[in-house]
Image (tube, rainbow, N blue to C red):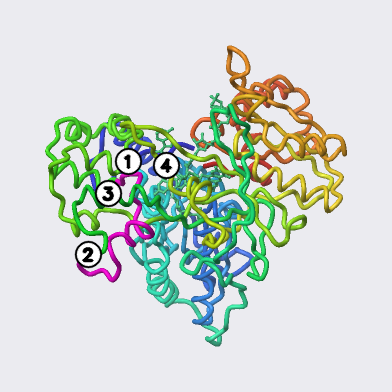
């Protein structure tokens, strides 16, 4: 569900006003639930702290579990649930609620919160005068709609008459400390009316020793080109050695890599700033060179830096796109430009180093869908990565992490990694259940892992893979592995869509349509439907095609087809890992 752009700090635009007036009209129709209803609840909700999470890659879930750990030290009863596990009727009876939620897409709900949000904004949703709540919102200020999902849930609960016991906390990518501090404030505030049993109950949750703040230094044991010479892309297979780390993972999980910046770009920026690389900026303990190498994003310009440069540089083109609030024009202007390109808009302007640094974002880890099964490779984690490289202003521009792995990790260097469990993205528990997997490009990664996993455990369920990329000759990655899986009967069907092998583009969703009757039959016999890869175009088009197939083959109206898809989601049979 596309969310409205909610103006938290700015005035409402006409579009936002129109959406909100419809939304508020719905709210007027809300009926007030009676106290009697809640008293009939099976569990006494008054004494439970409900901790609900909306997540894609596990951060919000981790914080929900942290919250439960803190609550347990107060001797409180807690119930931690994903928002897709919450029955809206049960929710109406909850008295004490903490929601920890990330934002996805362009200001959208994470997949596991989508249906909950639909229920929450429905005109049938009763008022919640007895609910006390707090919202912990996760996001990234690099996106236009920062923490939008959390903002909307927070606003909607207030509209429904629930009492906000603590102000919402919006967290940027460095969320750990700020979230921990909010949790330690929120728990006692939200629960001072609850009865406490003996305090001091220790958490039994097993936490990984390795995390973002303490990553595991892994040896890069393999860096192999998968795409062939002649391809328009550079897709690589990587393996990192995790033996002796104690790290455990599951097929479907995500691995995070903390990159190091390219030294040529570091030198060019230092040269442009006209300062000694060994200079130690004010308030810092390391040299400028070290800071720009390992601590700051120096490639893609963030919003704060763009605003700063616009103020300083007084450049007509930059000012026009920054000041006219046209996000598309700004994004078009910035496309392909890195920070050095922007600094060079006026090569003679002298920047104050401390001021410049204060406008940079901290260097972030990059996430990769794991392409190995631990059942086959317990001591290593595999990744399938497309290297990001392009040319602007006659200078090579490099994606930070993909080219760090491709070009800059020597034999004696270790790659810093940590894992994010993706508990929602797993092979079916029932080994007989069929799987349909749609994974063009690097979206193939988790499905390589799933197929290995199913082969090793001897799962008898049928497996159907839709894969594609630009050309069969150069981009059919893992071809031998998939041919072998077909021969062995592990892969029941393989449908390929090579987009540039003919005049007209052919995409995976075209192949889905060609087999629409069979695809619907698989869904009817309980198949799981998985999608991995590009979120902005592919996953949206595949979703639209899936609905079209259900409508066509199931003889349904579009509303019925939407309900069918919602049911797939409720049953956790429509699972996505899109980025
Ligand atoms: C959950 C998850 C799973 C993922 N799994 C995978 C995976 O399995 N495999 C994989 O390859 N990636 C995957 N990604 C994407 C990955 O995390 C990185 O975003 C990707 O590798 C690029 O990072 P980078 O540091 O190399 O590039 P960055 O330095 O982050 O640069 C990327 C930016 O460069 C710019 N850019 C890119 N191409 C061009 C161009 N041609 N012209 C001009 N500008 C351009 C764009 O602004 C883009 O945002 C995943 C992401 C998520 C969130
Ligand atoms: N958000 C992030 O963090 C992030 C970072 C890096 C990359 N990405 C995304 O990740 C994607 C993965 O890149 P990739 O190299 O693995 O492969 P890709 O760019 O997704 O390309 C794989 C295949 O999909 C095709 N395709 C293009 N548009 C499509 C559509 N609307 N529907 C279905 N198929 C479509 C491509 O065809 P054509 O190219 O011939 O049209 C190609 O054949 C990139 O597209 C990028 O958008 C996201
Ligand atoms: C594809 C993608 C889209 C995102 N879109 C947004 C966004 O629109 N607004 C925002 O504030 N954060 C956005 N984020 C950042 C996530 O909300 C943030 O990384 C969060 O910590 C993820 O939490 P999770 O692990 O619980 O899913 C996006 C992240 C990804 C990978």
User: Left or right: 407 with respect to 348?
Assistant: right
Distance CA(mark 4)–CA(mark 1): 9 Å
**Mark 4 or mark 1: which comes first in sequence?**
1
Pointer 3: what residue?
269
**Mark 3 or mark 2: which comes first in sequence?**
3
Q: Residue placed at 87% from the left, 37% from the top?
A: 489
Distance CA(mark 2)–CA(mark 1): 22 Å
Task: Rate crowding at label 3 as few (under 14), some (14 to 19) or many (20 or more) other CA atoms within 10 Å.
Answer: many
- Label 1: which secondary element: loop
Pointer 4: what residue?
398
**Residue 80 image position (x, y, % from top left):** 57, 65
Q: Residue placed at 67% from the left, 58% from the top?
A: 380
4 and 3 marks in contact (CB < 8 Å): no
Task: Rate crowding at label 2 as few (under 14), some (14 to 19) or many (20 or more) other CA atoms within 10 Å.
Answer: some
- The one of 129 and 460 positioned closer to us in this rendering: 460
Pointer 2: what residue?
281
Distance CA(mark 4)–CA(mark 3): 14 Å
User: Left or right: 354 with respect to 38?
Assistant: left
Pointer 1: what residue?
338
Q: Is residue 415 above or below residue 11?
A: below
Foreground: disc 3 or disc 2 = 3
**Mark 2 or mark 1: which comes first in sequence?**
2
- Label 2: which secondary element: loop
Magenta residues, as a range? 282-302
Label 2 beta carbon less than 8 Å to ligand 1: no
Residue 553 makes an appearance in the image: yes
2 and 1 marks in contact (CB < 8 Å): no
């Amino acid at each position: 569900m596309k969310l409205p752009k909610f103006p938290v700090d700015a005035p409402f635009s006409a579009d936002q006003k129109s959406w909100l007036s419809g939304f508020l009209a719905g709210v007027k129709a809300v009926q007030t639930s009676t106290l009697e209803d809640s008293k009939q609840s099976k569990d006494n909700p008054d004494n439970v702290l409900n901790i609900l999470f909306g997540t894609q890659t596990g951060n919000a879930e981790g914080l929900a579990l942290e919250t439960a750990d803190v609550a347990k030290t107060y001797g409180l009863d807690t119930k931690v649930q994903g928002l897709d596990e919450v029955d809206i009727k049960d929710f109406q009876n909850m008295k004490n609620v903490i929601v920890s939620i990330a934002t996805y897409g362009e200001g959208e709900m994470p997949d596991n919160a989508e249906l909950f949000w639909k229920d929450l904004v429905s005109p049938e949703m009763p008022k919640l005068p007895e609910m006390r709540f707090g919202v912990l919102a996760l996001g990234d200020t690099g996106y236009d709609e920062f923490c939008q999902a959390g903002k909307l849930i927070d606003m909607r609960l207030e509209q429904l008459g629930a009492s906000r016991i603590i102000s919402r906390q919006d967290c940027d990518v460095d969320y750990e400390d700020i979230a921990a501090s909010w949790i330690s404030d929120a728990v006692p505030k939200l629960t001072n009316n609850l009865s406490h049993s003996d305090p001091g109950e220790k958490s039994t949750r097993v936490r990984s020793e390795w995390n973002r703040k303490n990553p595991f230094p892994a040896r890069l044991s393999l860096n192999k080109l998968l795409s062939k010479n002649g391809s328009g892309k550079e897709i690589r297979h990587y393996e990192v050695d995790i033996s002796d780390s104690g790290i455990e993972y599951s097929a479907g999980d995500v691995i995070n890599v903390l990159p190091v910046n390219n030294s040529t770009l570091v030198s060019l920026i230092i040269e442009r700033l006209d300062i000694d690389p060994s200079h130690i900026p004010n308030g810092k303990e390391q040299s400028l060179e070290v800071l720009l190498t390992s601590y700051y994003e120096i490639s893609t310009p963030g919003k704060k830096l763009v605003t700063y440069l616009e103020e300083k540089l007084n450049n007509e083109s930059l000012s026009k796109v920054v000041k006219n609030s046209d996000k598309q024009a700004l994004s078009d202007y910035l496309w392909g430009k890195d920070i050095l390109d922007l600094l060079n808009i006026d090569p003679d302007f002298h920047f104050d180093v401390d001021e410049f640094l204060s406008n940079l974002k901290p260097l972030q880890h990059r996430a990769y869908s794991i392409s190995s099964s631990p059942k086959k490779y317990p001591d290593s984690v595999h990744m399938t990565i497309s290297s990001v490289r392009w040319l602007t202003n006659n200078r090579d521009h490099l994606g930070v992490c993909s080219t760090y792995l491709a070009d800059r990790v020597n034999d004696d260097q270790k790659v810093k990694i940590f894992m994010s469990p993706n508990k929602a993205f797993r092979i079916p528990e029932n080994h007989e259940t069929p799987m349909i997997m749609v994974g063009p490009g690097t979206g193939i990664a988790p499905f390589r892992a799933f197929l290995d996993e199913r082969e090793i455990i001897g799962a008898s369920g049928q497996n159907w893979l839709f894969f594609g990329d630009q050309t069969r000759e150069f981009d059919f990655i893992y071809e031998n592995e998939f041919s072998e899986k077909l021969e062995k009967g592990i892969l029941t069907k393989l449908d390929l869509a090579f987009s540039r092998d003919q005049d007209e583009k052919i995409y995976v969703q075209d192949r889905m349509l060609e087999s629409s009757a069979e695809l619907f039959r698989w869904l009817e016999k309980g198949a799981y439907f998985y999608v991995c890869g590009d979120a902005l175009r592919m996953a949206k088009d595949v979703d639209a095609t899936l609905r079209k197939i259900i409508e066509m083959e199931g003889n349904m109206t579009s509303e019925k087809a939407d309900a069918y898809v919602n049911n797939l989601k409720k049953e956790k049979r429509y699972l996505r890992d899109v980025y």
